[in-house]
Amino acid sequence: MIYCKLGSENTVLDSKDLESGINSALEKLGVRKKVLVVPPDCTRYHSRAGELTGYIYSYYKDCLKDILPALGTHTPMTCTQLDSMYGGIPKSLFRVHDWRKDVVTVGTVSGEFVSSITNGKLEFQWPAQLNNLVANGGHDLILSVGQVVPHEVMGMANYNKNLFIGTGGHEGINKSHFIGAVYGMERIMGKADNPVRSLLNFASANFTNHLPIVYIHTVIGRDNRGTLVVRGLFIGDDEEVFRLASDLSLKVNFNVLEEPLKKVVVFLDPSEYKSTWLSNKSIYRTRMAMADNGELIVLAPGLKEFGEDKEIDRLIREYGYRGTPATLKSQRENEELNNNLSAAAHLIHGSSEGRFSITYCPGFLTKDEIESVNFKYRDLNDMMKKFDPKRLKEGFNSMEYGEEVYFISNPALGLWTSKQRLNQE
């Protein structure tokens, strides 16, 4: 059922619209006494989920018992980050998701089903895992809050991903990411229907349909001045809410270019992007727009590590971003990588497969560290002077020395492709 449907590709929803939409939907849901909210962490700051969670808190007050940020494998939010995103909400309500210890398996998808959705490439079983608080917390309402936007693993982010991945466990996250990587990122991105989504939809229908889950989805775009605005708010308890948000997101967030891009410069906000685990969105979201032998330059002043988890950081340093064949060979031959398929999937996602070059300009990692994982390196200060994010505009820029550069200030907010690449898929 749909409880709220607001927006279009030309709509701008302000805070009053968002609060009104939330309150109207919650009124339709009736009285609830024990509410759990599952919003994103600070890596999805621009989703407006912090603001929406504040409205939910104001509505339910003492009946809002728990807030569980959907960390997935990300590091827990700091007090500063909580204040920035969720200021005004008591910190005593926030819980930390531990993807290795706090999960339960609510059901298992058969190897036959996995084989059917991957055209026989994979045959392992998949455990549908959730944080124990979600599965067994005894809440009479679970509100999953987040933004629908093109995504490298899920095709389109959010809906049941926020629960099965955002509050999932080690094995479930790893295997789902690996399914997406093996199937092919460029066959998935921007598509609501794909093997990974089929996996999660099967789990929702068969293992969690007894839980009182309602999804709250935003769609964020840019106006003609480049300012971020809310284009849509959709609230509902079934797949229709995801479809509505996905359809709008494709209109708002999918940028189709006439020709492939020869040089792309991406800036990564240092408050959000500190690891290549997250920073590689600069690669994921632009790869379908990149010309063969083109160059992607990533300005990453906050970059200090590869993985947000120490073990994943070690695996990235050990095996590097060397393309699908090399990664699959390493996965078959090395038990440690085979046991961490999420890391293997990430290594595939972070490679251009030799089609275009990737140059990282990090704030804290050294030249040797960057080059050891198969990226190129340039000095951040030099490149920030050459490509000043404060002077560049979104999209095409003609540089004073004659070169044309395509600039993206936040890759997480969209997906870019050329018509040529789109027609090949």
Image: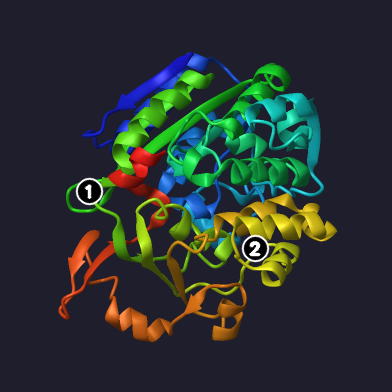
> Relative to 299, is 215 on the left or the right?
right
Question: Looking at the rendering, which quadrant does residue 313 occupy?
Answer: bottom right
355 or 138, which lies in front?
355
Q: Which residue is mark 2?
A: 308
Q: Is residue 313 above or below residue 68?
A: below
150 or 350, which lies in front?
350
**Nearer the observer, disc 2 or disc 1?**
1
> Relative to 84, is 325 on the left or the right?
right
Q: CA distance from mark 2 to mark 1?
A: 36 Å
Number of disc labels: 2
Identify residue type, mark 2: Glu
Residue 14, visible in the rendered structure: yes
Q: Residue at x 56, y 33 (%)?
A: 144
Question: Looking at the rendering, which quadrant does residue 330 occupy?
Answer: bottom right
Decide which of tag 2 and tag 1 comes sooner along the chain: 1
Which x, y percent locates residue 30? 53, 15
Which x, y percent locates residue 131? 73, 38
Q: Which residue is mark 1?
A: 258
Residue 62, visible in the rendered structure: no
Instruction: Assess disc 1: are there few (<14), some (14-19) or many (≥20) residues with their C-alpha within 10 Å of its C-alpha.
Output: few
Q: Secondary structure at mark 2?
A: loop
> Relative to 159, is 178 on the left or the right?
right
25 or 98, which lies in front?
98
